[in-house]
Amino acid sequence: MFDRYAILSGGVFFTHAVGEEEDWILETENPTRGTRVVMALSNRSARTAQEIFDAYADPDDDYGFTKTIVPVRLARVGAENLISRSQAKRLLARIDRFRVAVLDFAEVETIGQAFADEIFRVFVREHPEVQVVPVNAKPEVERMIRRARAHDQDGGAGADSESSITGENSEA
């Protein structure tokens, strides 16, 4: 809803601006206590509250916010690759509070087997009520997702399946 917002909590700073390609997440060496949130909304903003509600709320569920979109690239710290289960768990924090979790893999070139397995096999098995929808995945990322899903379906053999991964942002 806001044109810009920034969050500083502990030693982590996150900022987002509508229309800008990059979000920023930074860590400081000297964390502070508490949380500060700053938001700005243009007086000429064309976005409406109804557009926001329609994008994230389910009318069949009394308009509760049941959908979240998670930019996976923000799980990286610096230039690190997304390869570990602990990175996946950090990404998945509080995702179980939603019915639909859209994981946007834009700008993510590759992921590791353990990262994919933690999300698309372990988390999905432990939280069947949450629909995990990957979007904007590059072919290498799609391959790792298929591998994790196939590993779950075939009892651990890990063969690649023929199921496709959505490559564009779609309605979930």
Image: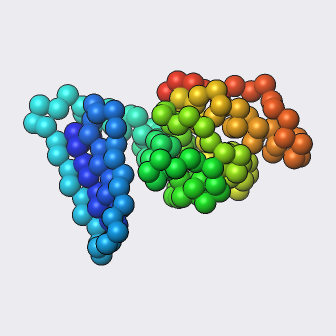
* Count of numbered circles on the image: 0
- Residue 139 image offset from top left, x and y in percent: 64, 26
Residue at 71% over, 32% down: 143
Residue at 69% over, 25% down: 164
- Residue 150 image offset from top left, x and y in percent: 80, 38
Q: Is residue 63 visible?
A: yes
Residue at 63% over, 50% down: 83
Q: Residue furthest bottom?
A: 33
- Residue 46 image offset from top left, x and y in percent: 20, 28
The image quadrant where one finds the C terminus is top right
96 horizontally vs 11: left or right:
right
148 horizontally vs 4: left or right:
right
- Residue 81 image offset from top left, x and y in percent: 56, 47
Front in this rendered view, residue 143 or 51: 143
Colour option used:
rainbow
Residue at 58% over, 48% down: 82
- In the image, residue 130 above or below residue 97: above
Front in this rendered view, residue 50 or 143: 143
Q: To which quarter of the image does residue 59 belong?
A: top left
Q: To which quarter of the image does residue 52 belong?
A: top left
Q: Residue furthest front?
A: 79
The image quadrant where one finds the N terminus is top left
51 horizontally vs 129: left or right:
left
72 horizontally vs 164: left or right:
left
